[in-house]
Amino acid sequence: MKILIVGMGAVGGLFGGLLHRHGSDIRFLVRPARQRQLESRAMTLALASGGFQFHPRLVTAGELDNDYDVIVLSNKAYALDGVISDIRPAVGESTMILPLLNGMRHLERLDRQFGQQRVLGGIAKTIATLANPTTIEVSNPHCSLTLGARLSAQQAMARQVAELMAEAGIAVELSEDIAGAMWDKFCRMAALGAANCLLQGTVGEYMQSRAGGEIALQLFQECTDTAAAHGHPLTAEAIGGFQRALTKPGSTFNSSMYRDMQQGLPIEGEHLVGDMLVRAAQAGVPAPMLSVANAVLQTYSARQGTGG
């Protein structure tokens, strides 16, 4: 199975590095500047259980051919338009696309461009950062992937991909309800990102304010109400567990969107909080706190000139 990983960042480098170590036929799609940066240099994957180095096989968009079996998207959601253009030459008759982006909106865009029959569902669960251009640091010991077929015709390929990931030492779950799993993560990421960015602090920091916990819980409820209205309710256990995570005193828990904001980088505000608001409106779900958080995110993006 020939695999193309889009991006040599934290998520792509983590799972791609494990596949590379396993001996999989894998290449990383990067920009020319990133290719020059990494040429003849080893990547270091620093895992909680130890680390290793590897020399990734890099390709640029102009070097792609259409004999890839699977294309794994690990890019940020706001970069999707450029990625779609870049990978088009790599999509052959039987190529499957496995997006690991946050949110849900990317599925509709990929379906329009390549057809729903080519697009699997997937989520990554990890806390990984690109510490420097050649070092990926993974702080949580239990990194995992969840993937699944969105159509019955995709089930065999989804199973093959999951088996390959498992053979490479990746904790992978083949979900029979990938849409439900994606909605679950969508709710968590949107609520946490909104809370961190609105309140300008980690969970432990905003819990020192009088109303921080109440605001975070309201944001999460608006998200879960929206998911339920669209036919994907979270379980009581999932809701209770994340409510505790959102209100744990002293916790350093925070979202990648908040970390990006703190560094003055583009954020996924429109793809998470903005899109959740759209879906809430479609279902008639009141979402006043999400509206406030979204205004903060849009103001930040306008100031950065990125559009969110």
Image (spheres, grey):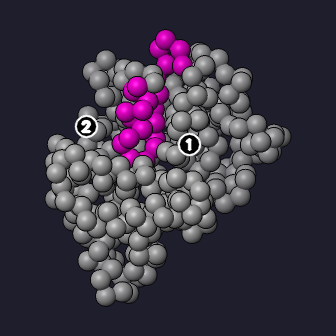
Query: How far apart, in angstroms, are the residues tagged by discs 2 and 1?
Result: 27 Å
Q: Which residue is mark 2?
A: 177
The structure residue drawn at horizontal position 51% and vertical position 64%, both measured from the top left corner, is: 300
Q: Residues within 10 Å of mark 1 (few under 14, many from 20)?
A: few
Task: Reply yes or no: does residue 124 show up in magenta.
Answer: no
Horizontal side of 85 relative to 158 (left or right) equals: right
Q: Cβ–Cβ below 8 Å for labels 2 and 1?
A: no
Horizontal side of 291 relative to 205 (left or right) equals: left
The type of residue carrying mark 1 is Ala
Ranked by sequence position, the earlier of labels 2 and 1 is 1
Q: In the figure, residue 225 lies in which quadrant? A: bottom left
Q: Is residue 106 visible?
A: yes
Horizontal side of 197 relative to 287 (left or right) equals: right
Q: Which secondary structure lies at badge 2?
A: loop
Image quarter of the N terminus? top right
Residue 176 percent coordinates (x, y): 26, 34
Q: Which secondary structure lies at badge 1?
A: helix
The structure residue drawn at horizontal position 49% and vertical position 45%, both measured from the top left corner, is: 77
Task: Reply yes or no: does residue 96 show up in magenta.
Answer: yes
Residue 237 percent coordinates (x, y): 19, 59
* Relative vertical location of residue 246 with respect to residue 308 in this rendering, above or below: below
Q: Indicate which disc residue 79 carries.
A: 1
> Which residue is nearer to you in this view: 307 or 55?
307
Q: Which residues are magenta?
A: 91-112
Point out the residue furthest to the top here.
93
